Image (spheres, grey):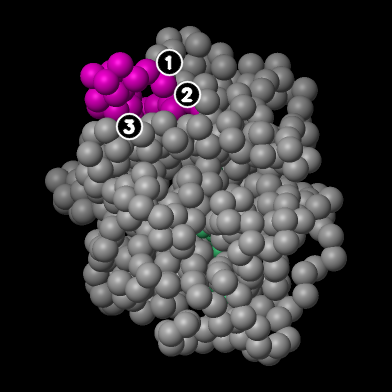
């Protein structure tokens, strides 16, 4: 039985990298061995091969969100509106185009490094599963159209139902450049590529203390890394740092994986690797696997008091029945298909729904990149280019783009963050259930649900 993707990625499981057992020096120390940390190390090594880079990872590379996500590799075209809030139109167009290029770049990186992560570039369907969701994409398409950019194809109702394998999809647009991957195999493959290029990786080595000395030092249980530059690539765990605690909201995303049923999937019409999202705020996202399962996820799960990433975010999800319910509601014909595994993971939701990059406390020697907000599989590759430029103090299109900003906006303090956040989430959930039933929410539900952070609707479409 499939458990988390990471277990399946045992294929890629070489001997674990050693833990750090001494005090060492490095040019660059990266904290966090997920996609963001690994891509950043690889980007730096490519640009400056002589750099001595160390990654410090608390468990195994890929144990965080990178090894357990839905595997959608999406561009930022659908986030064009959000990008324009921080960037000039030209910059927003350039970043969105660069994010789409990253999908192709990832394909060739995987081919060059023999990373077998089931990369399938079969596109992404941004769909509506009720009338209230219909046309959620309209403003993005119109804005892009004004610049003669047309990444989305509009599909007829019949086409949407036929290609998605369910007539619960009422309308939608298709972006051909998107892909899916087996996420943990990608993470383990990047780890292997990093090791091969001479990057040092220390696994089972949590940062216990971060000394903001000059140069800064990362203290681990049995050693330390003192480095000219430190990069914080810790995703939701970055809330352990007081400077970043209020810039993100830790919220779960929860996934179920079905048993194998390849023949029925094929005859339903959903025969390829096309990824699908509906247009809920608390988005449902789903894809097939190469061996004929459906992996179905639901965003906007649970919060944690104090914004901490507790054990609830690891392993089996408490939302399994709810997420399986969404699957069966979207695919009634698969109502008898059993769920073989389910799990949860933390999302580092920023206020805008876009990542942000910067210098901690304004220091050039401590950089961070986070806030991927549930869309990091492709964008971490782009984020790595930004972080590499910040580390190298290059003044270029990456370090000067609008996503490098002093403040990403702050979520409220506790207890307002937790209790207020839970109230908004519940209102959103209620509103979306009523939308499914074709009923109108009352003014109270609408008002409270309307307090959700801007851009949330565009997280996955
Ligand atoms: C269930 C789920 C589904 C998702 N689906 C999608 C999707 O389909 N498409 C998409 O684009 N995105 C998706 N995402 C988001 C995506 O997975 C993330 O944006 C991306 O993996 C972020 O990479 P990262 O390197 O920043 O974080 P992570 O992979 O979480 O890496 C951070 C690392 O830091 C390590 N760490 C934490 N604290 C310490 C410490 N003190 N010392 C040392 N190391 C530490 C962690 O162990 C972890 O390995 C999903 C996320 C989840 C949880």
145 left or right of 205? left
Q: Residue at x 28, y 77 (%)?
A: 414
Callout 2–callout 1 Cβ contact below 8 Å: yes
Task: Tell how many labels.
Answer: 3
- Report the Cα–Cα distance between label 1 and label 3: 18 Å
- Report the Cα–Cα distance between label 2 and label 1: 7 Å
417 left or right of 160? left
Residue 275 visible in rendering: no
Which span is picked out in magenta?
124-151
146 relative to 365, above or below = above
Q: Which label's residue is closer to the chain start, 3 or 2?
A: 3
Instruction: Name the outermost residue toward the front.
Output: 50
Label 1, on which residue? 153
Whether 149 is among the magenta residues is yes
Ligand 1 within 8 angstroms of badge 3 C-beta? no
Q: Residues within 10 Å of mark 3 (few under 14, many from 20)?
A: many
Q: Which label's residue is closer to the chain start, 1 or 3?
A: 3
Q: Residue at x 73, y 61 (%)?
A: 198
Disc 2 element: strand
Label 2, on which residue? 175
- Give the image quarter of residue 365: bottom left
- Give the image quarter of residue 143: top left
- Spot occupied by residue 12 in the image (x, y as percentages of width and height): 81, 52
175 relative to 102, above or below = above
- Spot occupied by residue 119 in the image (x, y as percentages of width and height): 68, 34
448 left or right of 299? left
- Give the image quarter of residue 117: top right
- Spot occupied by residue 126 in the image (x, y as percentages of width and height): 44, 28
């Amino acid at each position: 039985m499939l458990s988390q993707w990471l277990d399946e990625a045992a294929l890629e499981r070489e001997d674990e990298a050693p833990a750090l057992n001494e005090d060492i020096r490095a040019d660059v120390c990266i904290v966090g061995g997920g996609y963001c940390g690994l891509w950043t190390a690889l980007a730096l090594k490519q640009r400056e091969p002589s750099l001595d880079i160390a990654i410090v990872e608390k468990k195994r590379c890929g144990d965080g969100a990178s090894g357990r996500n839905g595997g959608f590799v999406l561009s930022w075209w659908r986030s064009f509106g959000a990008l324009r809030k921080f960037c000039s139109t030209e910059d927003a167009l350039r970043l969105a185009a660069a994010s789409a290029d990253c999908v192709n770049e990832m394909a060739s990186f995987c081919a060059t490094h023999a990373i077998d992560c089931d990369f399938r570039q079969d596109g992404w369907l941004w769909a509506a599963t009720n009338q209230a969701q219909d046309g959620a994409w309209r403003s993005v398409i119109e804005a892009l159209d004004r610049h003669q950019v047309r990444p989305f194809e509009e599909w007829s109702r019949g086409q949407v139902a036929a290609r998605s394998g369910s007539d619960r999809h009422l309308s939608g647009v298709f972006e051909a450049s998107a892909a899916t991957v087996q996420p943990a195999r990608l993470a383990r493959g990047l780890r292997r590529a990093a090791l091969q290029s001479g990057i040092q990786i220390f696994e089972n080595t949590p940062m216990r203390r971060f000394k903001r000395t000059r140069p800064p030092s990362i203290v681990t249980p049995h050693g330390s890394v003192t480095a000219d530059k430190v990069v914080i690539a810790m995703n939701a765990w970055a809330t352990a740092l007081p400077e970043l605690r209020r810039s993100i909201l830790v919220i779960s995303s929860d996934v179920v994986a079905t048993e194998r049923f390849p023949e029925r999937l094929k005859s339903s019409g959903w025969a390829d690797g096309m990824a699908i999202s509906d247009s809920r705020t608390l988005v449902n996202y789903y894809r097939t696997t190469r061996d004929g399962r459906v992996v179905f996820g639901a965003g906007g799960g649970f919060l944690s008091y104090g914004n901490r990433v507790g054990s609830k975010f690891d392993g089996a999800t408490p939302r399994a029945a709810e997420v399986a319910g969404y699957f069966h509601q979207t695919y009634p014909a698969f109502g008898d298909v059993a769920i073989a595994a389910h799990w949860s993971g933390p999302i580092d939701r920023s206020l805008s729904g876009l990542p942000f990059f910067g210098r901690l406390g304004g220091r050039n020697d401590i950089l961070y990149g986070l806030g991927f907000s549930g869309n990091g599989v492709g964008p971490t590759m782009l984020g790595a280019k930004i972080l590499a430029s910040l580390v190298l103090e290059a003044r270029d299109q990456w370090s000067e783009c609008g996503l490098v900003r002093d403040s990403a906006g702050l979520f409220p303090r506790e207890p307002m963050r937790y209790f207020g956040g839970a109230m908004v989430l519940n209102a959103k959930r209620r509103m979306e259930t009523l939308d499914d039933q074709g009923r109108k929410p009352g003014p109270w539900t609408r008002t409270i649900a309307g307090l959700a952070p801007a851009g949330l609707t565009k997280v996955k479409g």
